[in-house]
Amino acid sequence: MAWLWVIFTVLAAGGQTLRNALQRELTETLGTVGATHVRFLYGLPFGLIFLTLVLIATGGPLPPLHLTWLGWTTVGAITQILATALLLAAMREKNFVIITALSKTEPVHVALFGFVVLGETLSLGTTLAILIAVAGVLLMSWPSGALISASNSSEGFTWRPIILGLVSASVFAMSAIGFRRGILSLGDGNFVLRASTTLAAGLAIQSTLLTAYLLATSPQTLTALFKAWRPSVKAGFMGAFASQMWFLAFAVETAAKVRTLALVEILFAGLISRKLFKQGIASREAAGIALIVVGVVILLNQ
């Protein structure tokens, strides 16, 4: 049981990478909001299927649902949508490379919110692991001084995208804490059932809200989304699978440790990119990779 969260997190990171790849293919036809909605609308049926299978396997009813659970699940669902919108707004600015790096400071925010909301304290070793891993990500992602200077001189420096990037990381952290708090509020029953129930509810809330938004602002996008059902089903499945793994990890381990280990997704993606495109690794990137590995090793030994 102690190591299950590691397996769940690695599977979630892999599933999220595939989902992102599938969503990118849909962006051209559906737009950013439409492609984002795919993970919720087409993920909901799979979330319900996962819950049904868990109910059959456990032979038990749903855990007792209550307003506290619904409230925290709603917080997790809404803040996840809001965080995505903030990140996209930041990406529209010229400093998008820096924003990517800043958004990966999420584990630090999760650790802070986890302490305030859930009372989850972290050991010195875990705190050190989080800081080292996040530093590694920043080192890998932050553009060179020459690139920053060129960007600033040609476009003018502004704090707006940097603030949006940091706020998006903070709101993503709120989402993780909200979902974990919702799962934990269902008591000490089967953790798979608690996680699956919360996932299905979260997807239902998100699907309802974004569908209503698109109906009011861009019904043609919603029509295009339904027409592109074949590729959307694949993205929806991978999105639901990744979310299922995230929720299972949140059910058995603190969100701070889960989101820190999740940084290996960046490492995997970087290594795959280098392999596919036959590109070398700069010394700074190699140092960043080393820091992430050190942080993860420390984390897994806590």
Image (tube, rainbow, N blue to C red):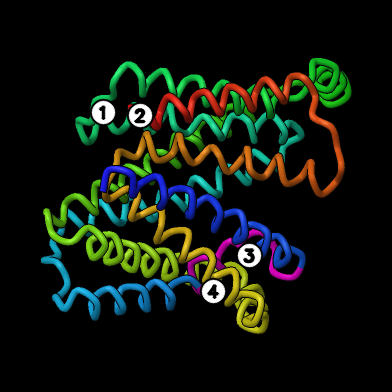
Task: Give SS at disc 1.
Answer: helix
In this view, the residue in front, 156 or 136, is 136
What amino acid type should be assigned to the residue bearing mark 3? Ala
What amino acid type should be assigned to the residue bearing mark 2? Ala
Kindly report the distance in space between the C-alpha atoms of the residues bearing marks 1 and 4: 39 Å
Q: Which residue is mark 4?
A: 215
Determine the main secondary structure of the stretch shown in magenta.
helix
Q: Which residue is mark 1?
A: 115
Q: Residue at x 60, y 61 (%)?
A: 19
Kindly report the distance in space between the C-alpha atoms of the residues bearing marks 4 and 3: 15 Å
- Against 15, residue 101 (above or below) is above
What amino acid type should be assigned to the residue bearing mark 4? Leu
Kindly report the distance in space between the C-alpha atoms of the residues bearing marks 3 and 1: 34 Å
Q: Nearer the viewer, mark 4 or mark 3?
A: 3
Q: Is residue 159 visible?
A: no
Kindly report the distance in space between the C-alpha atoms of the residues bearing marks 2 and 4: 37 Å
